[in-house]
Image: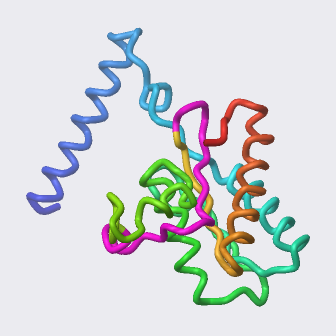
Amino acid sequence: MDTTSRANALSGAKLVGRFRYLRQNKPGLKSFTQQNLPMNVTLAQAETIIAAAKKKATEIDTKMDICVVDAGSNLVAFARMDGAWIGSVDIAIKKARTAAWFMMDTQALSPLVQPGESLYQIEHSNGGLITFPGGVVLKNGDEVIGAIGVSGSVVENDHAVAEAGAAAFDISYQGQSTRA
């Protein structure tokens, strides 16, 4: 074992020993999994959201790309319906990320990004944002824990499908979440 590997092994052993000491000698100390960390949408919830969004898209006879991200805008789940536009994949992801980053539905951002408005050209930031309807936040009370982004049709349909997915999240959360 070389010097670097030995040092890393010792550091890891010290860290494990420190956690063991804290757990045994500080009974009030919560473990990392018990701390009050921000919640995020789960994979199971994301799958429920996507299923409801796909159902709505089928009802209105359109094919959609559907993305669910967590509060940090990290991908949790994605579905591309058969026949959905490949070009809409990136748009769906960016709608979800935009909603999560700005903690509001992208529909609410639309009027703020028009020429002469306070957020004009903000869509060029953060690697590209999408500020037209189809991105909807997912909340636990007042806390944003994710977002859904949908693309593949006119923005009115995109938004309706995203809303259907978000509504399924509300139901699956047994009334604990609130829509913006």
- Determine if the magenta segment contains residue 145: no
**Residue most extreme to the right:** 59
Coordinates of residue 93 in the picture (x, y in percent): 54, 71
- Determine if the magenta segment contains residue 127: yes
Looking at the image, residue 59 lies above or below residue 107: below
Residue pictured at 72% horizontal, 86% vertical: 84
Examine the image and state in which quarter residue 62 appears. Answer: bottom right
- Image quadrant where one finds the C terminus: top right
Looking at the image, residue 63 lies above or below residue 1: below
Q: Is residue 128 left or right of residue 173?
A: left
Q: Is residue 31 left or right of residue 92?
A: left
Q: Count of labels shown?
A: 0
- Image quadrant where one finds the N terminus: bottom left
Residue pictured at 34% horizontal, 24% vertical: 20
Examine the image and state in which quarter residue 26 appears. Answer: top left
Q: Is residue 73 left or right of residue 128?
A: right
**Residue most extreme to the left:** 3
Q: Nearer the viewer, residue 124 or 84?
A: 124
Q: Nearer the viewer, residue 75 or 100?
A: 100
Residue pictured at 63% horizontal, 48% vertical: 42
Residue pictured at 77% horizontal, 90% vertical: 83
The colour scheme used to paint the residues is rainbow
Q: Nearer the viewer, residue 49 or 19?
A: 49
Which residues are drawn in magenta? 123-143
Coordinates of residue 146 in the picture (x, y in percent): 55, 50
Coordinates of residue 16 in the picture (x, y in percent): 31, 34
Coordinates of residue 108 in the picture (x, y in percent): 53, 55
